Image (cartoon, helix red, strand yellow):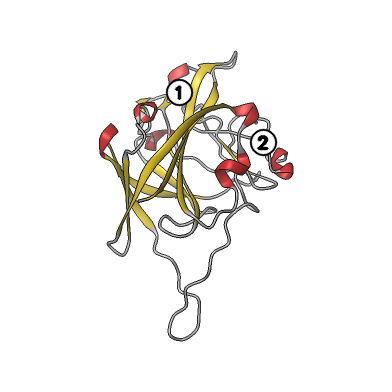
Amino acid sequence: MSRTSMSLWHVTLPVLACVALTGCSSGAADASSAASRAGGSSPSTPGSLNSPKDTGPEGTQRLEKSGKPRSAASPTHVSIPSIGVNSSLMRLGLNEDGTVQVPPAEKGMTVGWYTGGAVPGERGAAVLIGHNNTRLGKAVFHDLKKIGKGADIAIRNDRGAEIHYRVTGTETVSKKAFPTKRVYGATDKRVLRLITCDGAFDAQGHPVDNLIVYAARS
């Protein structure tokens, strides 16, 4: 397995219990699905990414005039002008083993939105996942490490609205010590997290770190 074929093997997403992403060898982030029970770091599991099933924010449901909950708009596109990202958004759920899905290698230039998190623009932490590299070459988040504080991230939804976030910081973490609670923990703020792989490669050719970008609604 070549090094360029792994962009997201391990991105850790926590669920106070678990949820993971698969695929950094074809582009994925990873984390284990059991470690987050304590709400802290979680060990890595090759080809998977943890998620926060139980750490998602609790928001107030919007109601239609009928009194029934109104479904939130779905994000369809993301752009980050400062690093040349301009991508449609595909929906990512969970794999059968409880890990978070990642975009397939053949869609390395497409960013994914984890539907188990918040909807961009709503209260809570919305999570976008993208490959750094795949076996096919450079991927959509290849230059994510170059993003600077204050950079604009724009997300458009299926109702034509555009939501803007400003980067507040970045963090490179070991996949063995992913900050689950910090990334997926409940919050009443409107925030965004971008996740990809980073760092050196282990003996199996998997990136050992994750790069996390934190942003807040502007």
The tally of labels here is 2
Image height of 124 relative to 128, above or below: below
Q: Write down the quadrant of residue 36 in the picture.
A: top right
**Circle 1 Cα neighbour tier, 10 Å, few/some/many (<14 / 14–19 / ≥20):** many
Residue 151 x %, y %: 32, 38
Residue name at image x 59 percent, y 53 percent: 186
Residue 39 visible (yes or no): yes
- Please give the label number shown on residue 140: none
Badge 2 crowding class, 10 Å Cα cut-off, few under 14, some 14 to 19, many 20 or more, is many
Which secondary structure lies at badge 2?
loop
- How far apart marks 2 and 1 lie (CA) works out to 21 Å
Going by the image, does 200 lie left or right of 19? left
Which residue lies under the disc numbered 1? 5
Q: Name the residue nearer the viewer: 166 or 50.
A: 166
Residue 84 visible in the picture: no
Does label 2 or label 1 sit earlier along the sequence? Answer: 1
Position of 40 relative to 96 (above/below): above
Q: Secondary structure at mark 1?
A: helix
Give the mark toward the camera: 2 or 1.
2
Q: Which residue is mark 2?
A: 32
